[in-house]
Image (cartoon, grey):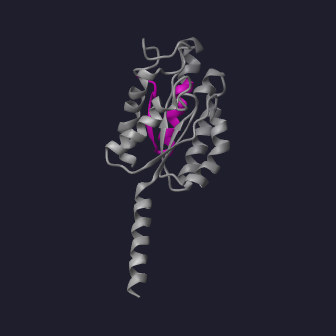
Amino acid sequence: MRSWWINAALLLLLWAQGAAAGTVLVVGDSISAALGLDTSQGWVTLLGKRLAEEGFEHQVINASISGDTSAGGVARLPALLATHHPEVVIIELGGNDGLRGQSPVQLQQNLAEMIDISQETGAKVLLLGMQLPPNYGPRYNTAFSAAFATVAEGKQVMLVPFFLDGVGGVEGMMQADGIHPAAAAQSKLLGNVWPSLKPLL
């Protein structure tokens, strides 16, 4: 009888430790997939190290795919949620929508759907906002950036207004293509995310 109670207590302890750890799911595009870099250099990998340094036991799942759009995120998110049961979902999508000139209204709808799907599972959401180069024109750029702010306010989720703040267009921070952040920028990207992510953990 005593052995049964001991085994039960150990199982309960292991369950509590697993439940406390939690999972952070990153659903993004090439920026979070660390395109052009070794994945060990990417900001998502650095996030895992930061969590450990700060005493968090969370596991980080990087479900980012180069070239993905917000529509792609909507399509694959339900399976990711069912597989990983994340505590926090970080959405880093929309940049490719903008580069392809897709509708900001559709972008907003897709982001809203991703947030709804995540929240229905009990996950908290952090949305990473993006901005476009000036050559896309002020009207489109304003509507594009506003899509992130509008959906974040409407769904009451945390927002990083511009994920590439201090990186985009900054000398030495971008790869030769001018689109993807260099290795030197990855800690800055994490620095942009961390203050908004930490309260959600």
Residue 7 percent across, percent down from the top left: 42, 76
Residue 96 percent across, percent down from the top left: 62, 26
Q: Quadrant of residue 16?
A: bottom left
Q: For residue 161: magenta?
A: yes
Residue at (51, 23) in percent of width and height: 131
The part of the chain drawn in magenta is 143-165
Residue 67 percent across, percent down from the top left: 64, 28
In the rendered image of this protein, does residue 174 appear above or below residue 81? above
Residue at (39, 26) in percent of width and height: 188
In the rendered image of this protein, does residue 138 appear above or below residue 193? above
Residue 108 percent across, percent down from the top left: 59, 35
Name the residue nearer the viewer: 87 or 51: 51
Q: Quadrant of residue 15?
A: bottom left
Residue at (60, 53) in percent of width and height: 83
Residue at the extreme front of the image, as rendered = 3
Name the residue nearer the viewer: 172 or 70: 172
Q: For residue 74: magenta?
A: no
Q: How many marks?
A: 0
